[in-house]
Amino acid sequence: MTIRIAKVEAFAYRVPIASPIKVAFGTFRDRPFVLVRVTDTEGVEGWGEAWCNWPSVGAEHRARLAADLGERLIGREFAGPEEAFRTLTSDLEVLVLQTGEVGPIAQALAGIDIAMWDLAARRQGVPLYRALGRSHATSVPVYVTGLNPDEPETFALPRQAEGHRAFKLKLGFGRDLDLRNLAALRSALGPSATLMTDANQALSLEAAIELSQAAARHDIMWLEEPLRVDAPPADWTALAAASPIPLAGGENLRGEELAAAAAGDVFKFIQPDLTKWGGLSGNIPILRGAVERGRVFCPHVFGGGIALMVSLHALAAIGGEGLLEFDCHPNAGREIVVGDVVPVTEGRVPVPQTPGLGVTPDLAALARYRTWPALP
């Protein structure tokens, strides 16, 4: 398939939230997201999303960057999304060195790549997961993410009533509070609920070992990012050997670092964020290899509706025993885009069978939250 690019656009949004969302390294006081639209010369469009959660000014910067970088594709012809991704990545190597903006440029490229894949699947008339090589998929399992340290059971119980069966708690707020919250969740949700934990790089090696051993009695599926991702490899190896809970990570790794983690023995669960680095073109080959080696792909997702949908399709395409991260906090950036396409039933959501991602953002409905470019 040959794709000739006619236009690349980006849009930044900020959705107010009633209750701040706390993680170990900071607090979300609104929900930003960046949409990317790529249109080919035949008028077919595809949608992507670029990660932009931090810093607080990140959304507008990423949107401007994606629009600027996308201009390099206009009028050019590519055999498919992978060629466009490789070409643009190569073209920008010197710019990355010049600016030092490794993350923002990677995130803008990820948004463009996702949009290219959505466009390609729409051109083929198939769901995105089929364009990625899987012949058929009907549903994937999900887990509730973003359980705050403030009485998380009060948020989790209604989600269980809505059909969720797996839940991830944020750690890193002190040993006593972390263990209190795990005990409260297990008691409230019952022995059949699946529990995961995420420390967002907040612990020392000694604290991570101690907490993992104390938390294991609550039957925890994984301990996510307990250490800084740049901690010495020996520390990660020591933790993997000492922890009775399997380790998970990958959302803050890129390129060769992610490939090495996926090929190594430290992480059982590999969790790249497709909107943060690599989109689909960069991540899919790494993930296929990881699953072949017995690792479990669980995409990291904490953004808008396109981020959720591309992660769903990637999980459906890769297969294995992974779960989809599912944000249940109110967020119009997800709700307006996704609508009722992925209802939760007994801990699973359906895989859309319509072309591409299965959703198209309603820009008019989102207009009240748009911060860039300014509305006419």
Image (spheres, rainbow, N blue to C red):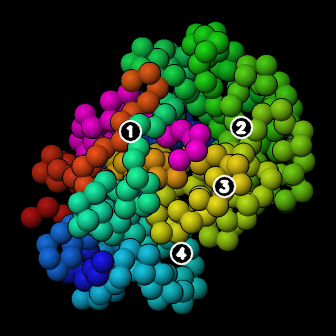
Left or right: where 318 falls relative to 179:
left
How far apart, in angstroms, are the residues tagged by discs 2 and 1? Answer: 29 Å
Q: Residues within 10 Å of mark 1 (few under 14, many from 20)?
A: few
Q: Is residue 130 left or right of residue 251?
A: left
The answer to whether residue 183 is seen in the rendering is yes
43 or 307, which lies in front? 43
The magenta-colored residue range is: 319-344
The residue pinned by badge 2 equals: 223
Quadrant (top left/top right/bottom left/bottom right) for the C terminus: bottom left
Name the residue tied to disc 1. 138
Q: Amino acid at mark 1?
A: Thr
Is tag 1's residue or tag 3's residue first in the polypeptide sequence?
A: 1
Specify the amino acid type for callout 2. Answer: Leu
Near mark 2 (Cα within 10 A), the count class, few <14, some 14-19 or many ≥20, is many
Q: Say the numbered circle drawn on residue 101.
A: 4
Can the viewer see residue 372? no
Q: Dot 4: what SS?
A: loop
Single out the mark in the foreground, 2 or 1: 1
Tell me the CA gap for discs 3 and 2: 22 Å
- On the image, which quarter does residue 331 sit in? top left
Q: Amino acid at mark 4?
A: Glu
In the displayed structure, 302 sits above or below 85; it is: above
Q: Quadrant of the N terminus?
A: bottom left
Q: Nearer the viewer, mark 4 or mark 1?
A: 1
- The location of residue 84, given as percent across then percent down, is 40, 80
Q: Position of residue 90 (x, y in %)?
A: 51, 87
Q: Nearer the viewer, residue 235 or 237?
A: 237
Q: Are marks 2 and 1 in contact (CB under 8 Å)?
A: no
Residue holding disc 3: 292
- Mark 3–mark 2 contact, CB under 8 Å? no
Q: CA distance from mark 2 to mark 4?
A: 30 Å
Residue 174 is situated, as x and y percent measured from the top left of the image, at 74, 30
